[in-house]
Image: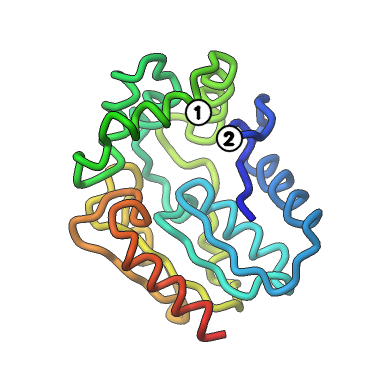
Amino acid sequence: YRVDLPNHGASPKRQVSGFADLVREVRDAFDALDLDGAHVIGHSLGGALALALADTRPRKVASLTLLAPGGLGPKVNGDFISGIARASRPESLAAWLKVMVRDQTLVDLPFVNAAFAARASADLRAAQSHMGETLFADGTQSFDLVAALHRLDCPTRIIWGRKDRVLDWRDALQAPGHVGLHLLPDVGHVPHLEAPDLSLGIISALIKSI
């Protein structure tokens, strides 16, 4: 199952009041699936929400994989957040997409066109801009999930690129000893795109170990 966050993909486009509002929506979508023993994977803001989900539904989550997750420190690239949300042309979107990766050749024309087509709506861009301003006011992450990370009982892995220019990979060092860390050299903010085989291998090994 793939859950589109509010103001992403096919989910509703609307203003959100804060991180707790997003957590409620993701938790409601998860509860509606009525799953037991789910292997939950989340990236960036989705990683923060996956962590919050595992914290509030611990008996339903069998494992957790966090890819460059938010919520583990105050730092965030505020220019990136506002720039990518407001980009109204493929050319401007491409410039911000390249911030996400170490190898910028990955952001080729088909990739940019597909990303732009998914967010060509002015209403979507406005909703994303408002969400970015709400969650990352003053270029700071407004939510702190370090305590939630320490409360986790399920097997957990964090995968993070050391060349991340959106979030600080050193935030992963907040993890307790029972959480596995995979800190990838020469990888940026999107390890599943930049190191797909390695990322898949880590996730597969985690699931098979349970």
Left or right: 210 as drawn, with respect to 184? right
Q: Give the amino acid at mark 2.
A: Gly
| Mark drawn on residue 8 | none
Depth check, front residue: 151 or 165: 165
Q: Which residue lies at the image location 66% right of the left edge and 69% below the top edge?
A: 38
Q: Residue 163, how many percent across, how many down?
A: 22, 51
Q: How many numbered marks does the figure carry?
A: 2
x 46%, y 74%: residue: 204
Disc 2 is placed on an element classified as loop
Q: Which residue carries the number 1 mark?
A: 118
Image quadrant occupied by the C terminus: bottom right
Few, some or many residues within 10 Å of mark 2 (<14, 14–19, 20+) = few
Q: Tell me the element at label 1.
A: loop
The residue drawn where x is 57% and y is 21% is 124
Residue type at mark 1 is Ala
Q: Where, by quadrant of the figure, is residue 34 drawn? A: bottom right
In front here: 63 or 16? 63
Which quarter of the image is occupied by the N terminus? bottom right
Pick the residue in front: 116 or 157.
Answer: 116
Percent x, y of residue 10 = 64, 34
Residue 9's disc number: 2
The answer to whether residue 168 is above or below residue 122 is below
Which of the marked residues, 1 or 2, is nearer the chain's N terminus? 2
* Location of residue 152 in the rendering, given as x and y in whole percent from the top left corner: 59, 73
Find the distance from the CA under tag 1 to the CA under tag 2: 7 Å
Check if mark 1's residue and mark 2's residue have beta carbons within 8 Å. yes
Q: Is residue 163 above or below residue 203?
A: above
Colour pattern: rainbow
Q: In this view, does 210 lie to the left or right of 68?
A: right
Residue 128 on image: x %, y %: 54, 26
